[in-house]
Amino acid sequence: MIRTLFFVLAVLILGFGFAWLADRPGSLSILWQGQLIEMSLTVAATVALAVIAAVMLIWWLVRLLWTSPHSARRFFRARKRDRGYQALSTGLIAAGAGNALLAHKMSARARGLLLAEQEPLILVLEAQAAVIEGRHDEARRLYQQMSEDPETRELGLHGLYREASRLGAHEAARQYAETAAEQAPYLPWAAKATLEYRCQSGQWEDAIRLLDQQRVAHVLSRPEADRLKAVLLTARAEEQLEGDPAGARDSAVHALKLAKDLVPAAVVAAKAYLREDNVRKASSILEQTWKVAPHPDIARTYVRARGGDSAVDRLKRAERLDSLRPNNVEGLLIVAEAALDAQDFAKARAKAEEAARMDARERVYLLLADIEEAETGDQGRVRYWMAQALRAPRDPVWIADGHISEKWLPLSPVTGRLDAFEWKVPFDQLEGPVEEGVVSRGDAAINALPPVKNAQSSTEAEQRATVEKAEKADISASPKTPAEPVRKQEQAETATPFFGHPPDDPGVREGRRPADDKNRLRLF
């Protein structure tokens, strides 16, 4: 298009020039070697342009003849190179598809048409063909050869890393990954592998420095880099907590700035502040994290922040924490547990039943069993709640790659992946079917039991009835006091359990404690 415009512009300029000469007629006389040559200006200009065009044509012909051998060689070389690249492209596609025979054939053809020193992709094709055919020694030799060339060093190190990982040579794989990460920190595979290896060996400082390099090189996005750095800072803070509480506090606080919902960081920061007797700051951090991510670890740490608190004081702290985020199961459970320790059975039962209606799970029913045992001692009701806990969904746990841990860990013990643990319900237990017409399992379980009777008021009523009966029978003449028949009546009458009588109920055994049932339940 540009050439066409230039051609049109040149034609316009020539036409304008000849028109200008035609409007201004004149003659041109040339005297050369005794001969006089006369012509008009238009003819002279035409002759001059023809001479110039003839000179340019002659020069082009001479140049074409002079460079024809080189042009011929270049033509045949280009055609050979095109055939080689076509074979190389076909071979790479065949290697990617797993066609080892075609990949090996195209590799030999490409090597015959191209020079391996000029085209490093030939080594890549040969290495891939060797891996497909199972010639791993040949593949490692080719990868080693590529790692010595600056142009293919990264590709060669990646191949050596994969071969070392396949053979289980983790130390060699770590060295290849670290070498690649030092020379090219923008490589995702090298940075990730090196980061995991340093974390597995507990080199948190080196891991954090490498993570910062990845962030500068734009290997990781800013949210992902902040999250991983918060995890690394939390892991370092956990190690520093015993020997360096101040360092652990700074690391955990920095981690919370990067990830506000990281529960382990909040717990470590609070413990570090508590070691410095700064209860106010520890409580503030726990309260802020509780508003974002309610967790039982935060609740337990918050309630027992002050070692000298009584059970009533712990109950007040639990209620304070629950008020920060109402209608939350974890808050209801921590209040119920604190109320149970404070012997406030009415509040403990009310909060536990509210939690059961909101989220009926194993921990809720176990807590109701503890409340039942402490308040009424009715073994039938205790076993009823234990049976409900056995059928209820499991509680959330720290889980990563199918592995359940009692506490949070920065790495997965299965795959070594960083930030793998999540607080969620394991999928190894399915919830039973919901009965038709029932709003929730918690409501159904609570409504199935009759309300708890007040043991003290019933005893007083029985005493008054016994005294009145004794007066009517005119037993005042007897030397015994009115209190004796009452005691005899209490000894004669035994409390009837909720589920049947002890001799007729095969589930009631003498000497068996509810704690044994709860321990046996937790084994499931």
Image (cartoon, rainbow, N blue to C red):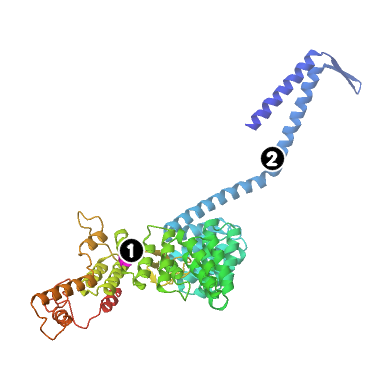
- Residue 255 quadrant: bottom right
Out of 279 and 14, give the one closest to the viewer: 279
Q: Is residue 255 magenta?
A: no
Q: Which residues are magenta?
A: 346-350
Residue hosting label 1: 351
Structural crowding at the residue carrying mark 2, measured as other residues with C-alpha within 10 Å and reported as few (<14), some (14–19) or many (≥20): few
Residue pictured at 36% horizontal, 73% vertical:
341
Asked if one can make out residue 31 in the rendered structure from this viewpoint, the answer is yes
Point out the frontmost of discs 2 and 1: 1
Residue hosting label 2: 64
Q: Residue lying furthest bottom in this view?
A: 479
Asked if one can make out residue 144 in the rendered structure from this viewpoint, the answer is no
Out of 426 and 75, give the one closest to the viewer: 426
Q: Position of residue 253 (x, y in %)?
A: 55, 65
Of callouts 2 and 1, the N-terminal one? 2
Q: Position of residue 284 (x, y in %)?
A: 51, 64
